[in-house]
Image (cartoon, grey):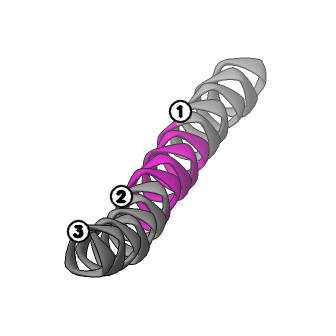
Amino acid sequence: MKKNSKSFVSSGKSCNFALAIQLWVVWSLGYGVMVTLQILVLSFLVRIRVSQQSKES
């Protein structure tokens, strides 16, 4: 009985570790996507401003 309970606990610890790694990967990918979107939107807004300024001149 003790062997089964020990293996269950150790598998639970490895499961928690795997879950933590998965959460970290998802968070970092989400952060990377957010930063990429901000860069793309900023460059788009700069292009609009530059084109508006050149039309006014």
Dot in front, 2 or 1 = 2
Residue at (35, 70) in percent of width and height? 5
Q: x, y (%) of residue 23?
A: 47, 56
Q: Nearer the viewer, residue 45 or 57?
A: 45
User: Magenta residues?
Assistant: 24-40
Q: For the N terminus, which image quadrant?
A: bottom left
Q: Which residue is mark 2?
A: 22
> What residue type is disc 1 on?
Phe
Say whether disc 2 or disc 3 marks the residue closer to the N-terminus. Answer: 3
- Relative to 57, say whether 38 is above or below: below
Q: Residues within 10 Å of mark 2 (few under 14, many from 20)?
A: few
- Secondary element under disc 2, as helix, strand or loop, is helix
The type of residue carrying mark 2 is: Gln
Disc 3: which residue: 4
Disc 1 designates what residue? 44
Q: Is residue 44 above or below residue 24?
A: above
User: Which residue is at 64% across, 38% downward?
Assistant: 50
Image quarter of the C terminus:
top right
Find residue 14 and report its image quarter: bottom left
Q: Residue at x 47, y 41 (%)?
A: 40
Q: Amino acid at mark 3?
A: Asn
Q: Within 10 angstroms of label 1, few (less than 14), some, or many (20 or more) residues?
A: few
Spatial separation of the CA atoms under disc 2 and disc 3: 26 Å
Sequence-wise first label, 2 or 1: 2
Q: Nearer the viewer, residue 36 or 17?
A: 17
Evaluate if marks 3 and 1 touch, with contact meaning CB atoms under 8 Å apart.
Answer: no
Q: Nearer the viewer, mark 3 or mark 1?
A: 3
Q: Secondary structure at mark 3?
A: helix
